[in-house]
Image (cartoon, rainbow, N blue to C red):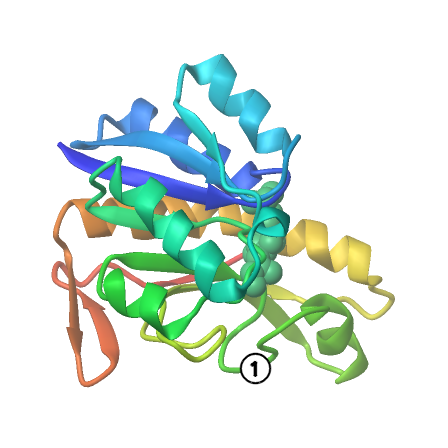
Amino acid sequence: MKRIVILVSGRGSNAQAIVQRCAAEGWPAQVVAIIGNRPGAAAFEFAAQQGITTALVDHTRHPSREAFDVELARVIDGFAPDLVVLAGFMRILTDGFVAHYAGRLLNIHPSLLPAFAGLHTHRRAIEAGCKLAGATVHFVTPTLDHGPIVAQAAVPVLPDDTPEALFDRVLAVEHAIYPLAVRWFVMGQLVVQGGVVRHTGGESQLLMG
Ligand code: GAR
């Protein structure tokens, strides 16, 4: 059984999608902990309902980014994970933290990377006149919102879109591709060569929503 730890900052709908698909599809994996950096995160309620262990590592209680990441890694490593999944974890991670989990740290970002790293991705896509937006699951490297791309989902940007409407449309496809990418990882179906990720069975890594 592969051991998965999920990191969240808020609502945790992606964490929920992964937990549910893992159980429904009987992956050889278990979500052993959901760890958050903000007290009262909604994701903790879901975890409690599911009987999943939770932990809070509050970034405001640490004097520096480095100190927070050291403590976070200590708590994560207590669960001996094979895979660490960032699911709406809104923290910039130190290079040391990223290096420690190299090759077993996934993130989802609400844009078609490499476009629109950073914040306010939906508004920026609309303002740029993009006709497509979407989400990307990638292995994490030290550069923010960057790293080998495991899967992408694309949705249309509609003529009268608002950032809120586009957010909802993108989030719906996030809930499809993130569980898929995590399943591929736990099944050992991903290879990374020259910064490019391929599915060993040739499954499509692109979802058109
Ligand atoms: C998701 O839209 C995710 O792509 C985004 O935060 C949201 C979390 O929602 N992540 C980032 O912006 C990371 N750069 P959730 O808590 O309901 O899963």
Q: Nearer the viewer, residue 206 or 62?
A: 62
Q: Nearer the viewer, residue 25 or 96?
A: 96
Q: Is residue 126 left or right of residue 132?
A: right
- Residue at position x 56%, y 38% in the image: 12
Q: Could you say which quadrant of the image residue 40 lies in?
A: top right
For disc 1, the neighbor class at 10 Å (few under 14, some 14 to 19, many from 20) is: few
- Residue at position x 57%, y 43% in the image: 58
Determine whether 104 is above or below 127 in the image.
Answer: above
Which amino acid lies under the numbered mark 1 shown in the image of this protein?
Ala
Q: Nearer the viewer, residue 79 or 66?
A: 66
Q: Which residue is mark 1?
A: 115
Q: Could you say which quadrant of the image residue 96 lies in?
A: bottom left
- Residue at position x 60%, y 47% in the image: 61
Q: Residue 197 in the image: x percent, y percent?
A: 24, 72
Q: Residue 49 in the image: x percent, y percent?
A: 50, 14
Q: Nearer the viewer, residue 11 or 122?
A: 11
